[in-house]
Image (tube, grey):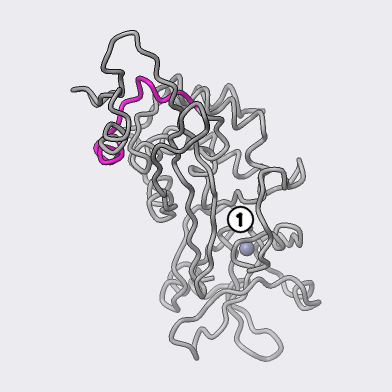
Amino acid sequence: MDIFKISVESIQVYKITQENFDEATKKQAPWYQPINGHDGWFAVCPACDNPVQIIGMMSREKPFGKHFLSSQASMLVPLKGIVDNDEYEWCPYASKNKTLNKSAQRHADSKVGLLIRQTLLEQFDRIIYLLEKCLGIKITLALAESMLRDYCAVEGWRYRGATRQNIPWIFAYMMQAKKLYGRIFLKQGLLLAEELCRKRPDLLCNQEHKIVTKTEKAFCDLTFSFIKHRRHLDGETLSESMELNIADSRQQTVCSKIIPFDYDFFFKLINSKDETYRNGQLLRLAQTFLAG
Ligand SMILES: [Zn+2]
């Protein structure tokens, strides 16, 4: 992996460089400690919370993180992170090539699952804001509530493809198809709205950028959903995406758009100290579904 964090609780994620590592740890133990007579650099995997060792910190141009849990040595060295083989097996950085499907679930009491749920609870308003920007569709309070309902019904935090860094997108991914009629497209989604109206001449994106039927009282059968969660490890760099799919009542795709997961955007947002734009209404909503 090409990124690290310094504790399970931390939501600050850094690119692996010697400078970032020194700055984040101040070279203190247990991050910086000799092992078997050699220098050792240790951190925590931002996706699965297991301990990682940084390889080639001084010798390589691009040092990288490697999960550190299988050998006996991990028992002897005090480390940050939670040693959990099960989480490691499914970690997108472990290149185990496990096939993801929605029925592959982690244990109900998994620490990673609980932490995902906790972040969603505390950051729900920002997550909705991020999704609006990434999807280009307005998420009303009613839609947010409906998404929360779907997410809780399937216990989305237990999905094996859910990690500490893809929380917003997987939250949306768990959503059951919703009606498209009356949805407002935002600036980022206008191209998609145009394409949709070209393909479906019975529809119109009106002045408010709302999808309506040209003839009043006409029925719009379209729904939108998120399908095809994909993850790909290119060298040490992870990329993930899902598809925003608009389909008709015969389950035929009318148009679709690939949504890449932008981890930097997410971490920047949840680490922001600016509380001006927090949305109490959304936070209270998340509280009613996710607390306890
Ligand atoms: Zn991991």
Picture layout, residue 52 above or below residue 146:
below
- From which residue to which does the magenta span run? 178-192
Residue toward you, 141 or 246: 246
Quadrant location of residue 155? top right
| Rendered location of residue 54, percent (x, y) | 57, 77
Q: Position of residue 11 (x, y in %)?
A: 50, 52
Q: What's the amino acid at mark 1?
A: Val
Q: Quadrant of residue 191?
A: top left
User: Which sits in the foreground, 232 or 271?
Assistant: 232
Q: Does 90 appear above or below 23?
A: above
| Residue at left offset 56%, top offset 59% | 46
Quadrant of the image where one finds ligand 1? bottom right
Find out whether residue 183 is within the magenta segment: yes
Q: Residue 53, how many percent across, how many down?
A: 62, 75
Q: Position of residue 292 (x, y in %)?
A: 67, 28
Query: At x 67% / y 57%, what residue is drawn?
Result: 99
Judge: label 1 CB < 8 Å from ligand 1. no
Callout 1 crowding tier (Cα within 10 Å): few <14, some 14–19, many ≥20:
many
Residue to which mark 1 is pinned: 8
Task: Locate the N terminus by quadrant.
Answer: bottom right
Looking at the image, residue 57 sits to the left or right of residue 219; the answer is right
